[in-house]
Image (cartoon, coloured by chain):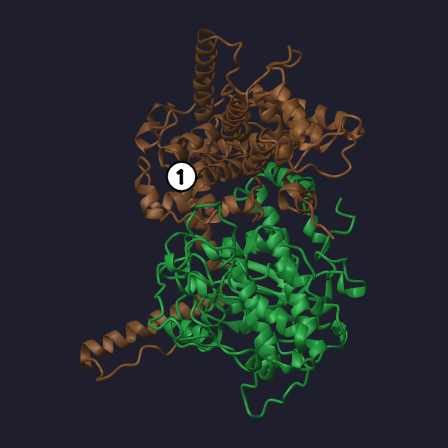
Amino acid sequence: MASTQVALSPRPNPPGPGASKPLPLKSKTLNVDNAKPAASVAASRASTPGLETELDAGAQMNEQVRNRYVIDKKIGQGTYADVFSAHVRSDPSKLVAIKRIRLQQEWENGITMDSIREIRFLSELKHPNVILLHDVFSTKDQKISLVLEHLPLGDLEEVWLKKDKKDPMIAYTQADIKSWILMLSRAVWFCHSHRILHRDIKSNNCLIAANGCLKLADFGLARPFAEPGRKMTHQVITRYYRPPELLYMAQHYGPKVDVWSVGMILAELTLRQFMCPGNTEMEQLNMYCEIFGTPTEETWPGVSKLQCYVAPDKPAAQRGHPKSWWESNFGLIGEDGRNLLRGMLTMDPKKRLSSEEVVKHPWFSSSPRPTKMEDLPTKGKADLKRFGDDLKRHAGELDSGRGDKVARKLFG
Amino acid sequence: MKLTEDDIYRRSTQYLHWSFTAAQLAAQRLKTNIQAAERVKAAVARQRAARALKTETPNASGSENASQNGANTPLPPPDREVDCLTMAEEKRLVDNFCEKALELGDFLKLPIEVTATGVQFMRRFYLLNSPMTYEPNQISRTAIFIASKAEGHHLPVAHYAASLPKTKPEDILAPEYLITQALRFHYEVRHPFRGLKGGHLEMMAMAAGKATLPPNIPQDRDPRALQQAMLELPRRPGGPASAMSEKELEKRITEAYGFASHILKNAALLTDAYFLYTPSHIWLSAHLLADEPLTLLYLSTKCPPSNPMHAKLLTTLRSCAALLSSHHSFHPASQTEEEKAARDKKDQVELKALMKKLRLCRDPDKTNLVKLNQAQKRDAVENGELEENKRKKRKIAREQYEKEADDFFGPSLSKKENENAS
């Protein structure tokens, strides 16, 4: 049905392997008609006396899906989810990851809203730069398991962040940064075209496939665009990546919040450190004001109406860093790159670039061209532990574990 | 490159897994019906056999003594075959319970997309299950609850259960997995509401002479000419041209929107429309029923009548409109109040009879969903998760042992209890 190629970005689809998504397992097309064999099993079983607990159609399909995978080992364990490495029973060379949502002690409302959201959105979003959800099933003890694409090469944070002195430093160039940011921006554009806000974009939610392809993961905080006038919670997006309007507690916002986060990732890749690692929300906001200047009604019309906005004491107190600061810190990405960066990191969301404008930005087509994903530098060897850690994490959590409890109240 | 609404819809789970032809839909329902009926008959037979066994042992004189075993449920005479629902009767019942679910959503003041999604979850559930197996009342409460989570509308289960008659939180939670498995974990339902709103805004812009027309529309229409054509639109199909003021035209468009919106919130949800048509078919058909000349003019700006697709599209829209207007919530102008009352009354009588029939053909194994759910969880512990089970047992034993030790020696001075973080 969908044999005609679907747009993967607002520009012509990239040629070569970039456009081809990992082979969807044939299982994906299980539909009601395919349930026939299962149903006939039920019918024949029903006629055999004594078997009183034969499964109904839904449970049978669930069992079929569950039996399709074989768990190999646990690669991550957290309070929110356990993660397993597994393979397809019929083809052991096909690896998958299984994210099994844990039952939450304090949650008494049945299946958690986060897992329902994540499943809901991932089921609709099939894109080479979005983590592929192969299947979903529930275990006998009623835990939901997400069968996800196997992405063994860690995440983007590991590329630029050197946590440990012993870690080898991964060297990369402007062309490599371009390639990663372009893949990420395509994913974000695709979400936005589906009217979905991700609301938790950060380096360690950008996972790396065996072929170097970047995949946006963790849709636990995602939601559809709101109807105009409908309120949303500002308690989303991990602090370092949270745009100023959310720190000012805006209750109406749109896809531009995700663009800010992508801008932060571009800055991190260039600086090789967190751009704004605020310890509190207040500190985070102060950092923004220092770098970009305190917003006023002139630079950001409407800002003074936001709940947490405080007008600067002296009008000229904070004017933001001059152009030279950007040039000296972001020399690596060149003039075009800095243009794009500052377009994404614009305090006023109305003036901030949209995800479509980002993908169409001249930086990506100017020289040097983005590196082919197969040629991108990686850690070289598979790191299932990191993959497991990335998947087990609860949406909105900082890695430090300090866990600013973003998104505990996300029902807005 | 452009990602069109069509591209997006064609890759949705709704299109890939939950869209059918009328024949596929009927075949699926028939299969479900036959299976469920067989199961009910088998379960009832088993139950009767068990009962017979029990009553036979004390004295073989008569079955009247059965009541002393606590078997006071009125059973049909032992040798009568269970009279199961037909496929059409099942559908009728499900439709009715969907309608009740809609009323429930209204009563609880839930946003329409929550109720609408819940109703579609129910309809999807009953493609694979029969009301004889799972009682629609129990299913509808939970379907709406799952929908509230899928639509991001926080509805704590305790609060929700308390607002329903004679309902405990575990009644809501028990069928959650049952339903979610039948839905195959597809939580997204594509509704026609947003499309209708968008179309309405476009028509208002056209009426104001500010339409943005797509290129390559062969008619020589500019926004002004389009506005003029709208002002002259006949009131009825084939009627005489009218000469409205801009105000009157706006009023007409707003009325059409209201009428179509009512259809989307009722007939569209309570028929098979979502299974058979796309969201844009549905809102355009509802609009066609609301104001045909207006809708046709709007369509012609998207797809001119000279385009071969136009005739095909219109045929589809008309068949969808026929489905929508067949629902009893649709109130055509030609119908008098008495006619409607008579039709509703007849519906009520028939439904009452169906409810009675349903009570006599319920699957006795599946009446108590809470117990059934508990049993399933117990099974899982017994079979699958032996390791987990052992660990828990050991932990309990250890705690018990420590407690006994504490009782005897007094508690230790500082006790770290976070030894296992799992």
Which type of secondary structure does the marked residue at label 1 adopt?
loop
Asked if A395 appears above or below A197 in the picture, the reply is: below
For residue A38, say whether it is visible: no
Which chain, by letter, is green? A
Expressed as whole percent of the image width and height from the top left, the position of residue A269 reads 61, 78
Question: Outermost residue, bottom direction?
Answer: A166
- Which one of the lettered chains is coloured brown? B
Q: Nearer the viewer, residue A223 or B155?
A: A223
Snapshot quadrant of residue B25: top right
The front one of B421 and B67 is B421
The residue drawn where x is 35% and y is 77% is B418
Looking at the image, residue A295 sits to the left or right of residue A379; the answer is left
What residue sits 24% from the left and 78% below the top?
B405
Residue A62 seen in the current view:
yes
Whether residue B62 sits left or right of residue A188 in the image: it is left
**Above or below — where is A374 with respect to A216?**
below
* Residue A59 on image: x %, y %: 56, 47
Quadrant where the C terminus of chain B sits is bottom left
Seen in the picture, residue A92 relative to A379 is either above or below; the reply is above
The chain to which mark 1 is attached is B
Q: Which residue is drawn at 55% across and 92% down?
A: A165
Find residue A212 and report its horizontal and vertical position in percent. Answer: 71, 73
User: Splitting the image into 4 quarters, where does residue A210 fall?
Assistant: bottom right
Q: Which residue appears at 35% of the width and 31% of the height?
A: B71
Position of residue A118 relative to residue A278, above or below, is: above
* Amino acid of disc 1: Leu
The residue that mark 1 highlights is B110
The image position of residue B133, as x and y in percent, is 50, 34
